[in-house]
Image: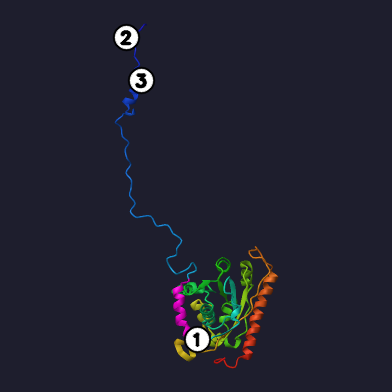
Amino acid sequence: MDRDPESQPTVATASADEVAEIIDLRPTPSAELVRVPTIEPTAAPPARFDGERRSDVDRWGRSERMRALTRTVYEPLYKYWFRVEWEGFEHLPVEGGALLVSNHAGAVPSDAPAIMHGIERDLGRPVYGLAENLFRRLPAIGTMWSRVGGVTANPDNAYRLLHDDRELVLVFPEGTKGTGKLYRERYQLARFGRGGFVEIAMRAGVPIIPIAVVGAEESMPILWKSKRLARLTGIPYFPVTANMLAFGPLGVVAYLPAKFKIRVLPPIHFDEEPDQERYSRSRVLNATERVRREIQDALYDMLRTRQSVWFG
């Protein structure tokens, strides 16, 4: 059956412009871009660091103003109470890094402040003292120790101070074994550990300068130690000193007026190339024993010539 042509469906066609006009996609001369609102910052961006330090506190926590104040306060104790005398002061370098190694004694050690004060006063160079991490854990005391030149004792800190900053660094290899000695064990050096300080000096390419101190043992001698109180307080040892018996509670910080003599021994240089990955253990241990023996011999020699604990 034939259909009527007029009844056939028709397909409408449109040009591209007509289609664009229908769906409103064709641009017109009057069209404008819609501006996206911007959010204004509420605060100015931080200023860039211009390389100038605004504080006198260096990256190790040491404050020159605090050191100056400490020297002013400590000077009468150094000059009139301990009456410190030096021998061999000329062995200390006026520039470059060096590792100062000394014996250690006294329930609250008095040798470190005396050494640091004397070198800074008479040589004009700062001294950084390496100490157990115990100091850093104590509130207020840890911050104060850093401000006066104390640094946590670890190989990385020692290497950067000696190699990168070329500073004088003071270390006590006996550690708490030295400060925890009883009075009857005075001036008998404990082991100097496994020689870590020697390896650091080799790696940093600096000399070791041994220092012997007489007088610190008698400034706060330990008569007895309580293991139970040490466990309760979390400290390496809990001492009962002659100072406590003489001065009562004040004896915790009050020193006896022992005469101090400090002898600086000739520097020990090493032939090993710096910055090696490893160093011979036998050479390290031999050098460690050499440093210990030189300090011990110097102590015995100084004690033989000493006339009095209090007057030298």
Q: Earlier in the sequence, mark 2 or mark 1?
A: 2
How far is disc 2 from disc 3 in space, using C-alphas? Answer: 24 Å
What residue would you read off at disc 3?
15
- Measured as percent of width and height from the top left, residue 149 is found at 50, 73
Q: Earlier in the sequence, mark 2 or mark 3?
A: 2
Disc 3 crowd, CA 10 A, few/some/many (<14, 14-19, 20+): few
**Which region is colored magenta?**
62-79
What residue would you read off at disc 2?
6
Which structural element holds mark 1?
A: helix
Residue type at mark 1: give it.
Lys
Residue at the left extreme of this rendering:
30
Residue at image point 60% right, 88% down: 184
Up-down relation of residue 275 to residue 302 (above or below): above
**Occupied quadrant, residue 180:** bottom right
Up-down relation of residue 21 to residue 125 (above or below): above
Up-down relation of residue 95 to residue 245 (above or below): above
Residue at the bottom extreme of this rendering:
307
Q: Which is more foreground, mark 3 or mark 1?
A: 1
How far is disc 2 from disc 1 in space, using C-alphas? Answer: 127 Å
- Measured as percent of width and height from the top left, residue 91 is found at 61, 78
What residue would you read off at disc 1?
79
- Measured as percent of width and height from the top left, residue 284 is found at 67, 71
How far is disc 3 from disc 1 in space, using C-alphas? Answer: 106 Å
Which structural element holds mark 3?
A: loop
- Let me know if residue 107 is in the magenta part: no
Relative to 104, 270 lies left or right: right
* Residue placed most toward the observer, 9 or 55: 55
Residue type at mark 3: give it.
Ser
Disc 2 crowd, CA 10 A, few/some/many (<14, 14-19, 20+): few
Task: Look at the image and tell me in which quarter the N terminus lies.
Answer: top left
Q: Residue 253: in sight, yes or no?
A: no
**Occupied quadrant, residue 289:** bottom right
